[in-house]
Structures are given as structure tokens and as C-alpha cells.
Image: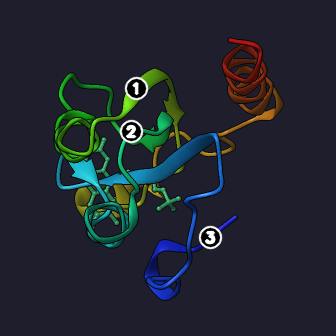
Amino acid sequence: MVEAGDASKVDVSSYDLIGLASGIYYQKFHKDVLNWAEQNLPQGKRELFLYTYGVKRNGYLDAIKQIAVSKGAKIMGSYDCPGFDTFGPFKLIGGIVKGRPNEEDVAGAVSLFRHCIKD
Ligand SMILES: Cc1cc2nc3c(=O)[nH]c(=O)nc-3n(C[C@H](O)[C@H](O)[C@H](O)COP(=O)(O)O)c2cc1C
């Protein structure tokens, strides 16, 4: 596992399947993850995306997908679930979706990963 913020020089070219994971920040993957992908994703990899959000909406994958597609990625799938969120006004009420991701969420992500390595 590579932390996007401090691993800009990690070489992932020998991996068959690359998972990109992030919380959602201002409708996108965190900028560190987007920057990392822009700079480090090799061409033509199989990729999957994992993310947590405070409020479910469409389009959270658009920016990361655009980068992946520009690098000729084969997108294998994505998994998302709510994640504890204390952003902005939610702080006033102690946050929303406390306790997520839970075991079931993690199991769902593992199952996507298993499915991808079989394909
Ligand atoms: C500055 C900031 C911006 C956020 N923007 C969004 C957003 O646009 N949409 C959303 O659903 N959640 C948003 N969230 C909530 C996070 O996506 C959520 O808490 C996520 O689980 C964080 O994951 P992480 O702690 O692994 O980074 C935001 C949180 C913060 C702190």
C-alpha cells in the first residue's frame, strides 16, 4: 500500500492490478490521490477505485476516471460506502455516518478485489 501524499516516487509498474482509494473531497478523490495518479500511474493497467463519502452523489469518480482513461487503463470496477464525516455543518451535530466503513463495507470492498483478481 502506498500513501499518495508521501510516495510520489513509488514505482507500481510491476503490478497487474492497481486500486486507488480516497475519501471524497469537494466532489472528487483527494487532490493528493489525483496528483499521485497523474504522475505515477503507468500506461495500460487494470485499475479499481474505492472511496468513502459523507453524502452519496453521482460523479465522484469523474476526475480519477479521466486520469485513468488518459493512461489507457482498463477499469475493473469500483466500490464505495459512507465514511464518518464531520465536514462543515456536520461537525455541529457530531458528524454523520459514524461507525462507517463497518465490517460489511470492508467485506464488500474485499469481494470486489477478489472478483478483479480472478478476471
Ligand atoms: C474538506 C472536506 C471536504 C469534503 N467534501 C465532501 C464532498 O464533496 N462530498 C462528500 O460526500 N463528502 C465530503 N467529505 C466527507 C469525506 O468524504 C468523508 O468523511 C470520507 O469518509 C473521508 O475519508 P478519509 O478520512 O479516508 O479521507 C468531505 C470532508 C472534508 C473534511
x, y percentage for residue 77? Answer: 48, 20
**For residue 2, which numbered disc appears in the image?**
3
Q: Quadrant of the C terminus?
A: top right
**Which mark, by number, is residue 74?**
1
Front of the two marks 2 and 3:
2
- Number of numbered tags placed on the structure image: 3
Left or right, 87 with reference to 59: right
Q: Position of residue 96 (x, y in %)?
A: 46, 44
Name the residue carrying label 2. Answer: 44
Sequence-earlier tag: 2 or 3: 3
**SS class of the residue under badge 3?**
loop
- Percent coordinates x, y for residue 19 in the rendering: 56, 44
Q: Is residue 14 left or right of residue 67?
A: right
Q: Nearer the viewer, residue 87 or 104?
A: 104
What is the quadrant of the N terminus in the image? bottom right
Callout 1: SS: strand
Looking at marks 1 and 3 on the same chain, the residue that comes earlier in the sequence is marked by 3
- Check contact, mark 1 vs mark 3: CB within 8 A: no
Residue situated in front as seen by the camera: 38 or 96: 38
Residue 108: percent from the left, percent from the top?
71, 20
Task: Check disc 2 and give the amino acid type.
Answer: Gly
Secondary structure of residue under mark 2: loop
Report whether the residue tagged 3 is closer than 8 Å to ligand 1.
no
Q: Residue 63, relative to residue 82: is it above or below?
A: below
User: Badges 2 and 3: C-beta atoms under 8 Å apart?
Assistant: no
Which badge, 1 or 2, is on the more N-terminal residue?
2
- Name the kind of residue labelled 3 in the image: Val
Q: Are marks 1 and 2 in contact (CB under 8 Å)?
A: yes
Q: How much space separates mark 1 and mark 2, taking CA atoms?
A: 7 Å
Between the residue at mark 2 and the residue at mark 3, the CA separation in whole angstroms equals 19 Å
Q: Is 104 left or right of 119, judged from the image as shown?
A: right
Q: Residue at x 57, y 63 (%)?
A: 12
